[in-house]
Image: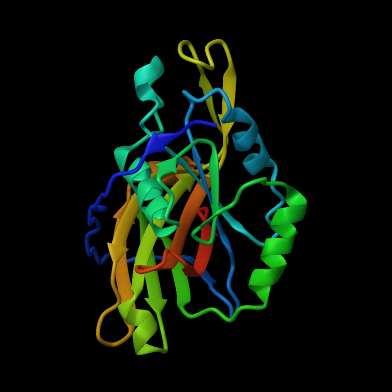
Amino acid sequence: MRLIHVYSVALPLLLSNIGQTYAAECTAKSGTHIVPLLELYTSEGCSSCPPADKWLSALNTESIKVIPLAFHVDYWNYIGWQDRFSKADYSNRQRKLAGFNAAGFVYTPQFVLNGKDFKGWDNSRLRQAVEKSKQQLARAQLQLDFVPLSNGDISLHAIASAQENDVAKQSDIFIALYENTLVSKINAGENNGKELKHDYVVRDFFGAYQMNKQLEFNKQFTLNKAWQQRDGGAVIFVQNSQTGEIFQSLALKFCSP
């Protein structure tokens, strides 16, 4: 287990409003109960991380109703291998979650389930946690729409809403674009000589955003046409800005034009 000390961070605000004419679309809407968000913090430079990556890839999300995301941190890049999927923003998110949990360090591999450290990860414990989440009513409603555009780009429309003022005021909204079936051949560092396979890898991360006075967040933006050839999708989730608790999460795979 890798350890590193925590320091405070601020996440950047990104996203642009873009309106375009579109044709066929696909949509996902959240239900009345919480769908858990499972975050993995990992690195190609960490020798203890490949088993966690493999476990995440093997999850049957149809039977275990959970939304997985893999954030590749950058703080192990110095030991000999530059993880091409790593970003400082992902390391910063992990440190912020550690602060929510009153932890004095971050480590890899780390699983975080609905904002809480998830140690001793296995399918049985995950199923138990998911069943418990099913009993909790969601405090936010989410929607994602993908629309293939005529020029090959994709329009992504994201909506989040709440019925309670207190929930809206405490809500941070994030959008992640993830990609599956990624392969890296490692030529240096602790995993030198290995071929690593990854799924649910976060390639872009947007937020935090807040709901407006009408208790609704509504954004539309355009993704480069390259995403139509990728095996991946988008995830939107709402997180309590005071505690790190996940109010609701929703995933949608990219649609064919």
Q: Nearer the viewer, residue 94 or 55?
A: 94
Q: Position of residue 3 (x, y in %)?
A: 45, 34
Q: Is residue 11 above or below residue 43?
A: below
User: Residue 67: where, in percent of width, then height?
Assistant: 58, 57
Q: What residue sits 26% from the left and 80% below the top?
A: 212
| Residue 133 x/y as whole percent | 64, 70
Name the side, left or right, on which 17 lies relative to 96.
left
- As displayed, is residue 197 above or below residue 36? above
Total tally of numbered discs in the picture: 0
Residue 18 visible (yes or no): yes
Residue drawn at x 55%, y 22% is 47
Query: Taking 227 as reference, is 14 left or right?
Result: left
Above or below residue 141? Residue 184 is above
Q: Give the image quarter of residue 244.
A: bottom left
- Which of the 4 image quadrants contains residue 150? bottom left
- The answer, for residue 62, to whether it is visible in the render is no
Image quarter where the N terminus lies is top right
127 or 116: nearer the viewer: 116
- The residue lying at 30 percent from left, 61 percent from top is 208
Colouring mode (rainbow / by chain / secondary structure / one colour): rainbow
Q: Residue at x 34, y 75 (%)?
A: 170
Residue 134 point in image, percent of width and height? 67, 73
Q: Nearer the viewer, residue 142 or 99?
A: 99
